[in-house]
Amino acid sequence: MTKGTPSRRGGKIVHIICRRCGKHSFHVQKKVCASCGFGDTARRRQYSWAKLRDGRASMKVHVRKH
């Protein structure tokens, strides 16, 4: 008899360190970095909505007014 839910093996490796940006965002199967777009495009992945507004601290940007 087992002790409830049996232990399982470790999960598969999905993301590894990107060669271009150095973040742990390079998808092994897709061969594309989720952070900088390496493998998909020669240009860096960047969006206007991802930039900090007015140079404020990152925690203050995400505070919503109700």
Image: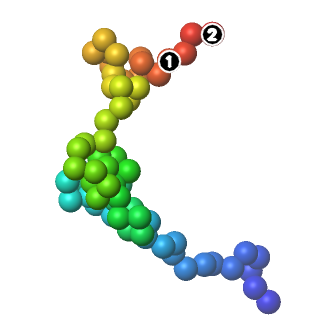
Decide which of 24, 6 is in the foreground and name it. 24
Task: Please name the residue shown 20% across and 54% down the image.
Answer: 20
Look at 28% across and 15% down and name the residue there. Answer: 55
Residue located 31% across and 36% down the image: 46
Q: For mark 2, give the secondary structure.
A: loop
Looking at the image, is 53 positioned above or below residue 9? above
- The numbered mark at residue 66 is 2
Q: Which residue is mark 1?
A: 63
Tell me where residue 8 sits by quadrant.
bottom right
Question: Viewed as shown, does residue 22 lie left or right of 7?
Answer: left
Residue positioned 48% across, 73% down in the render: 12
- Image quarter where the N terminus lies is bottom right
Count residues near mark 2 (Cα–Cα under 10 Å), then give few for <14, some for 14-19, many for 20+.
few
Is 47 drawn above or below residue 44 in the view shown? above
The amino acid at mark 2 is: His
* Residue projecting furthest to the bottom: 1
| Quadrant of the snapshot with the C terminus | top right
Quarter of the rendering containing residue 64? top right
Q: Position of residue 44 (x, y in %)?
A: 25, 43
Q: Is residue 19 left or right of residue 52?
A: left
